[in-house]
Amino acid sequence: ETGVTQTPRHLVMGMTNKKSLKCEQHLGHNAMYWYKQSAKKPLELMFVYNFKEQTENNSVPSRFSPECPNSSHLFLHLHTLQPEDSALYLCASSQFDDRSQPQHFGDGTRLSIL
Amino acid sequence: GNSVTQMEGPVTLSEEAFLTINCTYTATGYPSLFWYVQYPGEGLQLLLKATKADDKGSNKGFEATYRKETTSFHLEKGSVQVSDSAVYFCALTPFYSGAGSYQLTFGKGTKLSVIP
């Protein structure tokens, strides 16, 4: 399997639930990213990991907790979410030190908060 | 800071029409420029890229030329098809990165609908 794979593709959860989103990349990249895509809003970068170390946290609420156990896997742990957190969550990967190489995206997890 | 501005959508065209989606950027030096496409229900896919001035990126009949003098990277296609209906994002990575990773700055996206 190649590319960036995200699971699950769809997730419905209540505000008190705890769930996790998973991302796996098979491209040999060393940087991974979480983005949030909401209707009628620009793409929002949430977290960046280079070589498993978090280098960016763009003022994301603590109810979102990322984890990067190795350069191929990235998780986003969710707890006590709000209705406004309903969105498409996209994972991406890239070579962090090469500006000419594009980020590769997964197909996203569509999250709905009840 | 860096920014990308692309034309507001939605854009509706008839099949075989000519497409232009304008994109301009603000950045220091020579950023790398990208067009991504997002089909319904999918993530973003790289459509084409250009990494230096006057480079032309092309793929699937789409083209864009890196114009440093006008800080633009307009997307064009001579004859669109229904299957081109999607959201198109212009993006850049900066020339320098103090953090070590070259993060993408995206435009807001332009939704294209092509009707038969």
Image: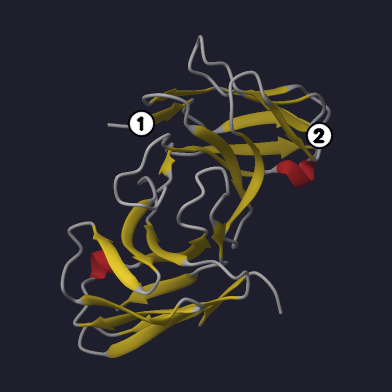
Q: Considering only order in the chain, which callout, 2 or 1, is on the residue closer to the N terminus?
A: 1
> Foreground residue, B95 or A13?
B95
Q: Residues within 10 Å of mark 2 (few under 14, many from 20)?
A: few
Whether A101 is drawn above or below A107: the answer is above
Q: Which residue type does callout 1 highlight?
A: Ser
User: Dot 2: what SS?
Assistant: loop
Say which residue appears at 62% left-offset and 37% top-offset.
B112
Whether A98 is drawn above or below B67: the answer is below
Q: Quadrant of residue A32?
A: bottom left
Q: Quadrant of the N terminus of chain A?
A: bottom right
Disc 2 sits on a residue from what chain?
B
Write down the residue under mark 1.
B3
Residue A4, percent from left and from top: 59, 70
> Foreground residue, B99 or B13?
B99
Residue A5, percent from left and from top: 58, 75
User: Dot 1: what SS?
Assistant: strand
Q: Quadrant of the C terminus of chain A?
A: bottom left
Is residue B29 toward the left or the right of residue A94 in the image? left
Q: Residues within 10 Å of mark 1 (few under 14, many from 20)?
A: some
Say which residue appears at 35% left-offset and 43% top-offset.
B97
- How much space separates mark 1 and mark 2, taking CA atoms? 27 Å
Picture colour scheme: secondary structure
Disc 1 sits on a residue from what chain?
B
Write down the residue under mark 2.
B61
Residue A12, percent from left and from top: 39, 82
Question: Which of label 1 and label 2 is nearer to you?
Answer: 1
Whether A13 is drawn above or below B57: the answer is below
